[in-house]
Image (spheres, rainbow, N blue to C red):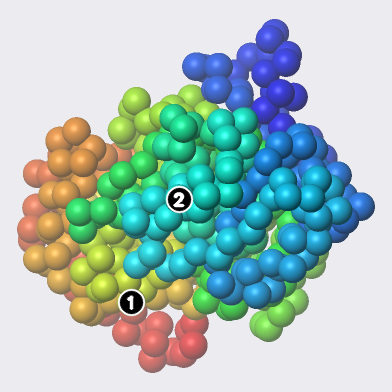
Amino acid sequence: MPSRVLADEKRLPGVREDADGFSLLAPDGTGYRAELISGVLSPDNPALARAIGGRRVVAFTGPTVGGLYGETLARYLGAHLAPGSWTLHTIGTGERNKTLATAERVCALAKADGLDRHGVMLALGGGIVADVVGFAASMYARGIRHIRVNTTLVGQVDVGVGVKTGVNALHTKNMFGAYHPAHASLSDPAFLATLPVREIRCGLAEIVKMAVILDEELFTTLERYPDAFRTSGTPTPPDVETYVLRTSMRLMMEELCPNLREKNLARLVDFGHTFSPVVETAGDHRLEHGEAVAVDMALSACLALRIGLLDEESCDRIIGLLARIGLPVFDPETCTPELMTRALEESWERRGRRLHLVVPTAVGKAVFVDELADVPPGVLRESLGELARRAAGFAAEGVGA
């Protein structure tokens, strides 16, 4: 919990790992925890109740997660909280429901349930529920506590370890949002067993991202176990999955810590997030976020190859791993010179008129390409052609099928 971080005033900023998860203390004094808790909704597990602290709770989940775990959460809250002090609602999920209207609905339901400024909003679900409820909590009564119980792989290794909340608006992903750390972020690896394969792959895309930019050992582990967190394919030892999960969480938090509120717009963790917003929106969200990120990473690797920053073997390894996981590496509908040029221009404008395009220089290392002029149209076109050929080759070989 945050108090466990902030109580020790002598601690230096940084990320600390312990048996239950990770504590972060940023240079600006912001502190929070991301915890790995087995059996988090078991009635005899006090972790969630301790985070709630006896406060009034309005909880939210999506239709799918609600169907799987809604009654379990209700039993837990009923066992630990006073009658009448909690409610549970279902909200729409998917990118089309990640809107200001949904955040307003969350606030309206909370107000109707009598949630006061000392109350807690609780999000049970994946990244979209966490983003929407977290943003609603940042607005409600000028900001109240929120708790995340992360049920997806993306939620556990990405959204659940950061401080960003937000919704899509004005035809732009995450246009409205706030930096609003969760009072508690609890992840139970057991939730992953009920995830569809597509959701697992999307989470693995975010893990590959961290491996490519920071950790060759993690990347090599994924090469050996591309079916991690799935019941099909090569069995993955539980200790390997624990290593992958904890390493990904730690790497993300370590990267976020010194620049928690993004005063510096050049961020390595934006690898895979320059082209992907346009891949998602121009494709009418036909691809999930993690799938669009995979396409972005593959294109960025080809760009790095064409610019002379990445060697052929490393480019093959990066794109090959994504394909072996079963992620798309090329999308003919959106991977056009016109749309990808638009993606570069929009990123340049969003990032303070500097491109800050993250490209790999080796497996485990990356740099920034900062100027639009460094990615001339001819190079982008050649990179798209290169990627299309590689994607066709993988498809012909049955890789990722």
Q: Residue at coordinates 69% horizontally, 73% vertically from top-left?
A: 68
Q: In this view, does 351 lie to the left or right of 155?
A: left
Q: Which mark is residue 108?
A: 2
Mark sitting earlier along the chain (2/1):
2
Does residue 240 appear in this view?
no
Residue pointed to by mark 1: 286
Q: What residue type is labelled 2?
A: Ala
Q: Residues within 10 Å of mark 2 (few under 14, many from 20)?
A: some
Q: Residue at coordinates 55% horizontally, 22% vertically from top-left?
A: 30
Instruction: Classify the position of the N terminus by image quarter.
Output: top right
Q: Where is residue 110 in the image (x, y as percent from the top left)?
A: 53, 48
Q: Residue at coordinates 21% horizontally, 69% vertically from top-left?
A: 282
Q: In this view, does 389 lie to the left or right of 62?
A: left
Q: What residue type is labelled 1?
A: Arg
As drawn, the residue found furthest toward the right would be 44
Does residue 92 appear in this view?
yes
